[in-house]
């Protein structure tokens, strides 16, 4: 049987902060509450509102900068986690045909203003072909992401392919969190 430890065997370590506060009696609850007491309504309400507004703006700015930088504590729930970070890094490292879909669609919209019916028909066929190519590219990218994540993490979170596809369809400068790496630098 194992020998029980007796209080003499246990070495007690004095807490530094507790040692510094000694030398006077512990304040009573009434004294502690009086020390914490401050008015419920500030004396200058406008100044209090201004200071609260500046504090809120500063907190929002910190959160915006933190999210753009990809800091985990500032990310939205949809962006948190190591697998989502891996997907972001993978998508940002490759060129996706889907990145140019918005400019292509904008160009098609402008060119459909041409009154020639045959040009409009060809533009629609080109647009449908482009969308089909984008879908195939996103499917291939999603399959590669799933295979890499299975090899690295074993289990997969739900919705990673969709998350990667939606990020790949955005123009690179408009992505949030902002891309952290350069093109061609795939995550390990």
Image (spheres, grey):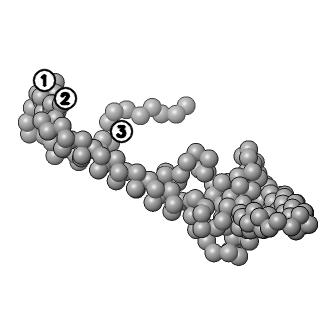
Q: Are marks 1 and 3 in contact (CB under 8 Å)?
A: no
Callout 2: SS? loop
On the image, the x and y values in percent for residue 177 come to 57, 59
Q: Residues within 10 Å of mark 3 (few under 14, many from 20)?
A: few
**Residue 104 visible in the picture:** no
Q: Are marks 1 and 2 in contact (CB under 8 Å)?
A: no
Residue at numbered disc 1: 30
Callout 1: SS? helix
In front of the other: label 2 or label 3?
2
| Viewer-closest of 72 and 24 | 72
**Residue 174 vertical position relative to residue 38 in the rendered view, above or below:** below
**Residue 145 visible in the picture:** yes
Question: Is residue 135 shown left or right of residue 104?
Answer: right
Given the current orientation, which residue lies at the most extreme top position? Answer: 30
Residue at numbered disc 3: 9
Q: Which quarter of the rendering shows the N terminus?
A: top right
| Viewer-closest of 23 and 58 | 58
Q: Which quarter of the rendering shows the C terminus?
A: bottom right
Taking the spot 66% from the left edge, 65% from the top edge, the residue there is 171
Taking the spot 71% from the left edge, 67% from the top edge, the residue there is 103
Taking the spot 48% from the left edge, 33% from the top edge, the residue there is 3
**Residue 115 vertical position relative to residue 72 in the rendered view, above or below:** below
In front of the other: label 1 or label 2?
2
Residue at numbered disc 2: 40
């Amino acid at each position: 049987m194992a020998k029980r430890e007796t209080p003499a065997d246990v070495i007690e370590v004095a807490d530094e902060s507790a040692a510094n506060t000694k030398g006077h009696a512990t304040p009573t609850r009434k004294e502690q509450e009086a020390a914490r007491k401050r008015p419920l309504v500030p004396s200058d309400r406008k100044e209090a509102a201004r200071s609260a507004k500046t504090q809120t703006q500063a907190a929002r700015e910190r959160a915006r900068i933190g999210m753009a930088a990809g800091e985990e504590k500032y990310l939205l729930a949809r962006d948190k986690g190591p697998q989502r970070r891996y997907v972001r890094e993978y998508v940002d490292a490759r060129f996706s045909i889907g990145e140019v879909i918005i400019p292509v669609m904008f160009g098609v919209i402008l060119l459909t203003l041409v009154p020639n019916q045959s040009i409009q028909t060809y533009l629609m066929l080109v647009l449908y072909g482009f969308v089909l190519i984008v879908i195939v590219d996103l499917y291939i990218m999603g399959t590669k992401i799933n295979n890499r994540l299975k090899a690295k993490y074993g289990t997969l979170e739900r919705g990673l392919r969709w998350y990667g596809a939606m990020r790949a369809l955005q123009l690179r400068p408009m992505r949030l969190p902002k891309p952290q790496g350069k093109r061609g630098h795939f995550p390990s």
